Amino acid sequence: MSDETLDVLIGVYLIPDLAKEDFDGLIKLIEDKSVTSDGVVLVSKDEQGELHVTEAGDHLGRRGATVAGGVGLVVGLFSPPLLAATAAGAAVGAVAGKFASHRIAHGIGDKMDDALPPGSAGVIAVYDHADAEGVDKALANAVRKSAAQIDKASAKELKGGLEQAAAGLAS
Amino acid sequence: MPEHAIDRTVLPIRRLPFAGVVNRTLDGCEPDWNQAKRPMPPEDAPNVLLVLIDDAGFGNPSAFGGPIETPNYTRIANEGLRYNRFHVTAVCSPTRAALLTSRNQHRVGFGLVSEFSGPFPGYNATLPRDCAPFPRVLQENGYITGGFGKWHLTPDDQQGAAGPFNRWPNGLGFGYYWGFLGGETGQYDPLLVENQKTIGVPESEDGKPYYLPDDMAERTIAWLHHVRAEEPATPWFAYVATGCSHAPHQVPKEWSDKYAGKFDQGWDALREETFARQKELGVVPADAELTERNEAFPAWDSLTETEKRLCARQMEVYAGYSENADWNIGRILDAIEEMGELDNTLVVWIWGDNGASLEGTLAGTFNELTTLNGIPLTVEQQLALALKHGGLEAWGGDQMAPHYSSGWAWAGNCPFDWGKQVASHLGGTRNPLVIRYPRKIADAGGLRSHFTHVVDIGPTILDIAGIPQPDSVDGIEQEPMHGFTFADSLSDAGAPERHTQQYFEACGNRAMYKDGWWFAQRLPRIPWEFDPDVLRHFGPGAWNPDDDPIELYYLPDDFSQARNIAADHPEKVEELRKLFWEEAEKYDVLPLLGGLSSFYGIVPPIPKESKFTYRGDIQNVPAGMIPKIYNHSYTIAADLVIPDGGAEGVIVAEADHLGGFVLFVQDGRLKHTYSMLGVFEYRQESEAPLPTGEVNVEVIFAADAPKPATGGEVTLLVNGQPVARGRMEHTVPSRFSGYSGMDIGRDNGLPVDRSYADKLPFAFTGTIKQVVFDVAPHLSDEEKEALHLHAQQALAAHGANA
């Protein structure tokens, strides 16, 4: 299963800067090719309750405005207004990722909105199932994690995987 | 009225013999105007302000070296005296019973708390008539008496509109009372009583959230103003017992944010910092030792970063909450000063009725009722639930009912070990006391180290007021007060120490103090665990209390109980062990664990009533008096009249989103929401709108089995036809709330279901003819017995933690 399967993981954090710390750690693993990822997103909710995509990384571990096409896998799941406020948003807008057509304008964003109270943060990551242990360790500060598996060859499953992972947070 | 003519030892004071002359007509009569007067306190009797803070430790307030800024407490200490060897009983109700009656708590039925009335004299939670509280003595001697805040001395099943009221504050010496009867309340949504009436949940004004501690200070000040408007000179007695710092720890952010980052160093370092300040202040002797780390509490360094940050925030909230209490007492003091009466007021301020509370478990909890219900949550689950209910931003707000980690309580009891419930150790029994009374105190800012105890407060106040302890009250011969006056210590630092021996006992933890020696036997149990499997080790035939580990301290040389010298003094151990048993017998402490007898199969008869019918405008049924729908099948049915055009609103609701249930109509549909303490939420709703006219609705919970926290199937019915089904995997085993009540036709306070939060109280717009609970359908006798046993155990466990 591992070679053909992607994990979709959502981790939620009580402490936003610990989410950032874990996010950075995961990006480093991707850069080092210790983890094969199709994208990572750091989201946060400010004290006024606004959800933001704080940072994004692609399959090469590149982040923010420098990110190229691969960012679309995860970042593309968020609605354009949400992304517009981020550096990554510009990149997404410029280069359509291979999963851009499966962008979920509302669903996952809404679920993250429900799962995160003001002043908290979350990380969403899509990566090879074989790297699950490494990702799990990297996201050590998450107070709750929920993962789902999707078939690597079928991008259509991404939405379902994310929904499944998000549903796991609610259980 | 000539003082010699009044016999104050028999109360109420008898009418005076007529000293004038009476004739057939007024011709030649000589009046005696004393006939027209009521008894008044002796000349020069002062006003008395008695303040009791809740669930706080020796090392909390800055006046005693703690990290919490308490400028008003420090002011009173600096203008008065600090007492650094003052003791309480280690649990809420027992300390209040001992404080107000001046008798040892077991002797007045309060070996444990008012939530559990047990079958032994020391644990029946029923204040006896032969131990009249000293406020009653003051009242009968002419004082104007008022009380504000937490009471916790009325049996749980006597707090409703039907009374009886003789163990409400008005029946025990308070001419006026405003506050709450139970052991705790929400600060934003308290359920309040005034005198003998439940007045409900206050509503916010001016767009600001209601906040009980602020209102309580204002009510106290208003009462003082009213008293003085009509009684310019009569001494008053005001008892102000804050809900703070008991859970739920709730305070507006402007208070908690003052402490941002102040506790990042953790509880181990905080203890050391506090200890150093305590030595600088002199409230701890220079040669005292800081007690060693207690393995029951994790080292701060062993916590994950998330745990540290969450725990630090917990203590920031607790500190802000406590500082707010100090501020509010300061407002009362300022008002008294503005009235020109501060120097004629004896201020007695006790910081904590027991040590700081250990009941938040290791991680702290978003909802203290999870602990009180015995719901075992791991640290990871607590963190996730904290996130679910709003995270760090919500800690201290109205969406949580939080309690901090036990590690902070341990640090708050610095330099001592343990805390609340643990009567064997000073962490549970020694609290700060300050007294201000310039008419007697010449060395303002001084320190007193007399061994003093909460039962001494009443005798000391009466002594200063010049009022004798009564021999008889209401024709009932009085048991002499057990406490001793220490009034002379106010003016004389070298005054003799009268209180030379004292037993301590709570939840099986016990100690015997005599002439500086302290013998201790702690029940080998973690205080916040009330698991029957743990407690059965202490059951009949399984436990010999004399086999519990023995500790012995000599406090004159060892202020903090840092050096156990039991092995060096076997003769002293035996002497004090023997004395403890003698005292325990004398004061009704026996049987040990009498307050937890239900854990050992000693339970009251099963109630015969299983059907409860509510008609009319019924609101605010006390949390402990709602129908017991726990752990078994039940039904709730309502007869409604739905007008043309439909209706909406709450049919019946108990408590809130952190534990409760509601049956309501919204968007025309019948809905049922059940919150299992905020851990799980279950919802069912009908698809079709309710019909109009006469409608019967019903919710049936069919339990899987009659067992604690049972799961089961829920069915909603309209006119006997099922309209919705669902499952509740886990249910509340003991109690939805420590304070929030049940309402018919509305949901007072916080909502059970937030979907109607913007319409609170979401009053029903149709007509509710009646709501009927059937709480014990279809149980075998054996099942009834088993559930009844559990219910009593849960009640006892809840009570011990209250």
Image (spheres, grey):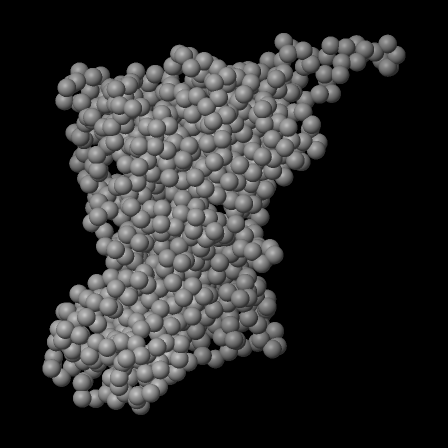
A157 vs B35, nearest the viewer: A157
> Which quadrant does the C terminus of chain B fall into?
top left
Q: Quadrant of residue A99?
A: bottom left
In the image, residue B293 sits, relative to residue B691, either above or below, namely above
Q: Quadrant of residue B521?
A: top left
Residue B655 percent coordinates (x, y): 45, 56
Residue B512 percent coordinates (x, y): 28, 23
B781 vs B27, nearest the viewer: B27
Residue B753 percent coordinates (x, y): 45, 65
Residue B481 percent coordinates (x, y): 44, 20
B311 vs A93, nearest the viewer: A93
For residue A107, side relative to residue B331 (left or right): left
For residue B459, side relative to residue A56 (left or right): right
Which residue sits at x=36%, y=60%? B391
For residue B477, side relative to residue A149 (left or right): right
Which residue sits at x=32%, y=41%? B409
Which residue sits at x=26%, y=41%? B268
Which residue sits at x=54%, y=21%? B438
B614 vs B266, nearest the viewer: B266
